[in-house]
Image (cartoon, rainbow, N blue to C red):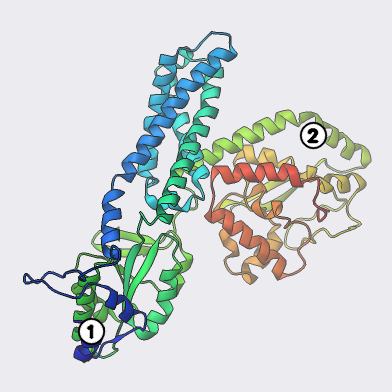
Amino acid sequence: MDCAEGAAATSARLDRGFCPRMAQAPTRSDPKGAVGSPTAPARPSARGLARDSAKRFAGFPFAAALVDALAIFAAAAASAQLYRLLTLGRMPEVEAATSVGLVVGIIVVAVAIQRGQYSLNVYARRGGLFALSLSAWNFAFLCALALGFATRTSALYSRGAVGVFYVTGLIALFGARRLLAVLVERAERAGLIAPRRVVVVGFEDALARHTPRVEARTDRMHIAATIALRDNSASLADDLALAAATVRMLRPEDVYLAIPWTRADVIEAAVDTFLRTPAEIHLGGEAVLDQFKEARLVRFGPTASLGLTRPPLTRLQRAEKRAFDIAVAGLGLVALAPLLLLVALAIRLEGPGPVLFRQTRYGFNQEPFLIYKFRTMRALEDGARVKAATRDDPRITRVGALLRRFSIDELPQLLNVLAGDMSIVGPRPQALAHDQRYVERIARYARRHNVKPGVTGWAQVNGLRGEIRNDEDIQARLDHDLYYVDNWSLWLDMKIVLATALVVFSQKNAY
C-alpha cells in the first residue's frame, strides 16, 4: 500500500515530506507476506545501512574500554622508563609500575562503564572528553593511592614516579579517547554510522511543536516520517493502524509520540499499538521539560514519576570539589602569607578600624555564614540596608582602592573555603539585602544557592563584576552562574582558577 492508497483507505493526513520517503521505501510483498525491496536499488536503503552500522559498531563499548586500558597500561610502562632515565637508572622497576597501571586502568574502565561513557554518542560529540577523562582519572588515581596506603605497598613506589605516571597517564587516556573520537567522526562522514531514524506520530498541532525539537537533537537522529492523527475518536483506530503499518515498513529505531499528556486515552491506545512493533517508544514531553536536561523516570514503589532535577553534585563530585578546594586554599594561604601580612599591616597603619571586614552572606542551601574580607571602606555596613560600592566611592580608603582593583581584598575568603562555607569556584555571594531583593525580582535566582558560593566564578572571569546597575546586569551574572551549576566539572574549576589569575590584572570594572 503506497502513500496515496493509505490515505484513501483511512483518510489519514500525512505530512508533505512523508510521501516521498514512503515512495523510496520498499513497497512489494513476497508470497510469505514479508516486505521486499525494489527491483534494482541504486544504493543500500537507509534501513539496511542502519542495520549494518548497528551490527558493525555493536562492539564499540568493548573497543573503547580496551583502548582506555591499553593506553593506561602503556603509559605506566613508558612513565617507568622515563623516570628511570631521569634518575639515571634508579627506581622504579617496570613490573611494579605496570602493576599500578593495571589497577588504575581497571578502575578507570569501571568508572567509565558506570557513567555510560563508552557510547558512540559520547565520542561523536567530542566536546567534554577531557573533562570526562580528568574526572575518571582523578578518581581512579585516588582509589589506587588509598589502596596502596591500606595495603602498605605505597612505600614501594617513588613519589616522583607516581607523579610522572599521573601526568603521562592522563595525557595517554585523553589522547586515546580523542583519537577514537576522530575515527568516529570520520566513520560518520563516510556514512558508516547511520543516524537513528525516528517516526513522529501525533496530532497536527502537536507535530508542529514537537518535530522541530526532535530535529534539533544533536545525537545523530533523523526523522524518517511524520504521521498526523485526526483529532476524532472514530478514526483513531484506523489512523493508528496505518501508523503501525508504516513503522513496520520503515523499521525505524524509535517512535516518538507527539500527543498532549491531557489525552491519556489516545496515549494509551498509541502505546498499545506501537508495543507490537520492534521500535523504542518515546512519549514526547511538554515544552517546560526541555529546560531539565537530567529529567528521568523515577519509581516510588509501584508509582512512577518524572524526576526533573538531580542534586547539582553527586557525592563523588562533592568529594572531588572539596579536595580541590582544600588543596588550593591551603597552598594559597601558605604561598600568599607574606602578602597577607603586608596588607594587614598597611590597613592598620592607614587608620583605625579592624583589618578584616565580616558580613553575613547566604551560602549553600541559603544558609547564612560570615564572609571574611580585608577592610577597604571606612563604613562597615551589614543588615537590611547595604549600599553597593560605586566608582570613586568616597567610603573606599586609599589602600582599599588598591586592594579592590586587584581583588586582593577577597583573599581572606580562603579561610571560608577551609571552613567549608565557601568553595574556590562558585557563584559570588551577595549581601543579604541585595540577595533577598534579587530572589523576589529575578526568576530562579535562588538556584545559585544549590552549590557553595565561590571566591571566584564563571561570571567573574567573563567580565561580569563590579557595580550592578539594573536587572539586566544581574540576569547576565545569573545566566553564567546557572551555567556553572548545570555544567560543573573539576576541569571547569581549574579553568576558572587559571582564568582568574590572568584577568585579575586586566579588568577595568573592579572598584
Foreground pick, 30 / 315: 30
Percent coordinates x, y for residue 320 in the rendering: 51, 39
Q: Would residue 494 appear left or right of 301 to someone viewing this image?
A: right
Q: Residue at x 22, y 82 (%)?
A: 2
Q: Which residue is mark 1?
A: 239
Foreground pick, 304 / 263: 263
Res 387 → quadrant: bottom right
Looking at the rendered structure, the kind of residue marked 1 is Asp
Q: Would residue 313 appear left or right of 484 to someone viewing this image?
A: left
Residue lying furthest left: 31
**Labels 2 and 1 touching (C-beta < 8 A):** no
Regarding residue 262, the answer to whether it shows in the image is no
In three-dimensional space, the C-alpha distance between marks 2 and 1, rounded to whole angstroms, equals 75 Å
Relative to 116, say whether 284 is above or below.
below
Relative to 156, say whether 466 is above or below.
below
Q: Which residue is mark 2?
A: 340
Q: Residue at x 40, y 51 (%)?
A: 187
Tally of numbered tags: 2
